[in-house]
Image (spheres, grey):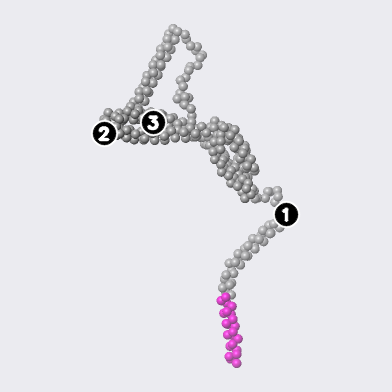
Amino acid sequence: MKPRPALVLTLLALPLAVALTGCGGATSGDKAASSRAADSSASGSTRESGGSVDSPGAPAAKPASLQDTLERAVIATGELRLTAKDLAGTRQDAINVATSLHGYVGDEQSQSGKKGELDRVDLTLRVPAASFEEALDRLAALGTVRLRQQSVEDVSTQVIDNSARVRAQRASVASIQQLLARANTIAEIMSIEAQLATRQADLDSLEQQQRYLHDQTSLSTIQLTLTHPAKSTQRPEHHRATGFLAGLEGGWHTLGDVTVVVGTVLGAVLPFAVVLALVGVPAWVVVRRRRTALPVAES
């Protein structure tokens, strides 16, 4: 059975109706604002004409701007690389800093040495956005800072746009559900359910984006890396040998270098010497025998 024309027309006209409703709401809001402005102007003119007069020194009230009424939404991230002698203790201190600020450890990866001691610790800390700077400062004080980076991304416009889309999509889904409740035939039900499934999927996607933005703006992320201090292999200046010891050390190193050079030369010449010995010795023996046999033949 074919769907009724009236219901199909209603389904097709639904998006236009939602748009017109928004426009109508905006128009009525503008009219109300204009009316309030007119009333305020009239009351102001009445005060100027014969009523009470405001004090000249009183500051004029400024209308609230749109930026003042909207709360900024930012995503703050930071990265810290510290060196410390006691990695286990520093790791626990970092966790205590996060929990004291009502945060938590989002992820942790550790590397151990041959003896089972910690060699490296990577922590992902989530702290409230309002405590982001305080958390960075307290964590940096736990060791020697090798790297400190932070970035802030303003996503206020994205949050506002996403919230408006969620509200509009919820209204659209509710309207489709009302149409589904009034459907009488199987064809009508199937057609409306297809529209409902598509719009519900779009709503779920928008709500997931909304939850993600809320999580990222309410909690900041700090990547903390803990390692041991680098061991210096260079001898300090005040421990370097001088005088006879310095000459002995220099001569010893020179002798080592000369030995390396001689060994390199011998290694390069040895293959040629072996070949010459294998070819030259038999030839020399043959020549010597011939010279020895010649006098005997002449006699």
- The residue depicted at 37 percent of the width and 33 percent of the height is 199
**Residue 289, x across and y down, in percent:** 59, 84
Q: Residue furthest right?
A: 244
Q: Nearer the viewer, residue 110 or 56?
A: 110
Q: What amino acid does circle 2 point to?
A: Lys
Q: Are marks 1 and 2 in contact (CB under 8 Å)?
A: no
Q: Residue at image x 41%, y 34%?
A: 204
Residue 273 occupies which quadrant of the picture?
bottom right
SS for tag 1? Answer: helix
**Label 2 environment density (alpha carbons within 10 Å; few <14, some 14–19, many ≥20):** few
Residue 2 got which mark? 2
Q: What residue type is disc 1 on?
A: Gly
Q: Quadrant of the C terminus?
A: bottom right
- Mark pair 1, 2: CA separation: 109 Å
Instruction: Decide which of tag 2 and tag 3 comes sooner along the chain.
Output: 2
Percent coordinates x, y for residue 146 in the rendering: 59, 42
User: Which region shows up in magenta?
Assistant: 278-299
Percent position of residue 21, x then y: 35, 25
Residue 27 appears in which quarter of the rendering? top left
The span from disc 1 to disc 3 (Cα, nearest Å) is 87 Å
How far apart marks 2 and 3 lie (CA) works out to: 28 Å
Mark 1 neighbour density, 10 Å: few (under 14) some (14–19) many (20 or more): few
Q: Of the numbered discs in the image, which one, if any, rests on residue 233?
A: none
Q: Quadrant of residue 263?
A: bottom right
Residue 206 located within the stretch drawn in magenta: no
- Residue bearing the label numbered 3: 169
Magenta span includes 280:
yes
How many numbered discs sit on the rendered protein?
Answer: 3
Q: Earlier in the sequence, mark 1 or mark 3?
A: 3
> Which one is closest to the eye, mark 2 or mark 3?
2
| Disc 3, SS | helix
Q: Magenta region, mostly helix, strand or loop?
A: helix
